[in-house]
Image: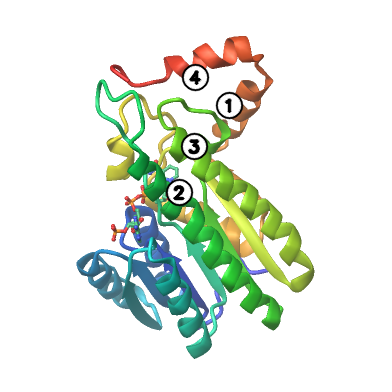
Amino acid sequence: MLQFGTMPPGFRVLIVGASGELGGALAAACARAGASLSLWGRDSQKLERASAQCLAAGARAVSIRSLDLRDLDAALRAIAAEDDESPFDMAVFAAGLGDIRGAGQSFENPQLVARLVSVNFLAPSALASALAQRMAGRRHGRIGLIGSAASFHALPFAATYASSKAGLARFADALRIAMRPHGVSVTLVSPGFIDTAAAHRVPGPKPFMLSPDRAARAVLAATLRGKGHAIVPWPFAILRLIVAALPRVLRDPLLRSLAPPGI
Ligand SMILES: NC(=O)c1ccc[n+]([C@@H]2O[C@H](COP(=O)([O-])OP(=O)(O)OC[C@H]3O[C@@H](n4cnc5c(N)ncnc54)[C@H](OP(=O)(O)O)[C@@H]3O)[C@@H](O)[C@H]2O)c1
């Protein structure tokens, strides 16, 4: 069994969302373990910075790709071309978008709904599916998908974020079962709060916040072990059970009460 820190030399890893804070921490951790990396994101300057940091940290090789995941055909062509050139041993899909609304904005903008579904659900599901098929042909590979503890709850102020991540969670579970006989593991990681700028844009308290480095270590440990589902940190697993056990008459006002003021 592979463990974090013991990647074989040249272990080839794709990080989608490597220009982000969790993605950057994932890339840096893989670099320290001597991986060969492909870093995807949109912001090419951030990708170039991440690439330089990864090379300095010990990555065997780094390539970058700037692309918008909403152009799904281009993303599918890119993953196929990169995997043909040098097959991936592992991929972590960490790109994601939130749906923060300002005070008084009670309704979600339909364009934002479509963007969130594309980035949080459609693209990672389609890309993971394409890569799983290729990995299954080699009978080897690990796929990590970044969900969210928000997906456990019907958050009325983040309906699309919670539900796009819930869709991704169901997809990950089904793909995991389908891929097991083919030697490919699929891991869903559902973090609570990670200390990133994106999290700080969400109003309200953020208990049990993880640093990006700690979250990245948890993601890589779970994905390399081939664990089905990791909820980090663990109190969010307990919270999930408590809220699920509540009757709707108690649950609905509780979830409503979590809404930021003015929404
Ligand atoms: N932070 C938290 O508290 C928290 C909690 C639970 C789950 N998560 C999940 O963890 C992941 C990383 O979160 P983070 O806090 O590190 O966020 P972040 O720093 O904002 O990173 C988000 C990443 O997604 C990429 N991205 C967004 N839209 C894209 C698009 N249309 N095409 C291509 N790439 C796109 C961004 O690329 P560019 O920057 O280049 O545009 C960036 O690399 C997300 O999936 C998030 O939902 C975060």
213 shown above or below 98: below
Q: Identity of the amino acid at label 3? A: Ala
Query: Alpha carbon of mark 4 to alpha carbon of mark 2: how far?
Result: 22 Å
261 shown above or below 101: above
Q: Which residue is mark 2?
A: 117
Q: Secondary structure at mark 1?
A: helix
Viewer-nearest of discs 4 and 1 = 4
Residue drawn at x 65%, y 24% is 244
Query: Alpha carbon of mark 4 to alpha carbon of mark 1: how far?
Result: 12 Å
Query: From the viewer's perspective, is 96 left or right of 145?
Result: left
Q: Identity of the amino acid at label 4? A: Leu
Q: Which residue is mark 1?
A: 239
Q: Secondary structure at mark 2?
A: helix
Q: Position of residue 191 (x, y in %)?
A: 49, 43
Q: Secondary structure at mark 3?
A: helix
Viewer-nearest of discs 4 and 2 = 2
Q: Position of residue 80 (x, y in %)?
A: 50, 80
| Disc 4 to disc 1: CB gap under 8 Å | no
Q: Which residue is mark 3?
A: 162
Residue drawn at x 65%, y 27% is 241
Give whichever of discs 2 and 3 has the lower sequence position: 2
Residue farthest along the front direction in this orientation: 110
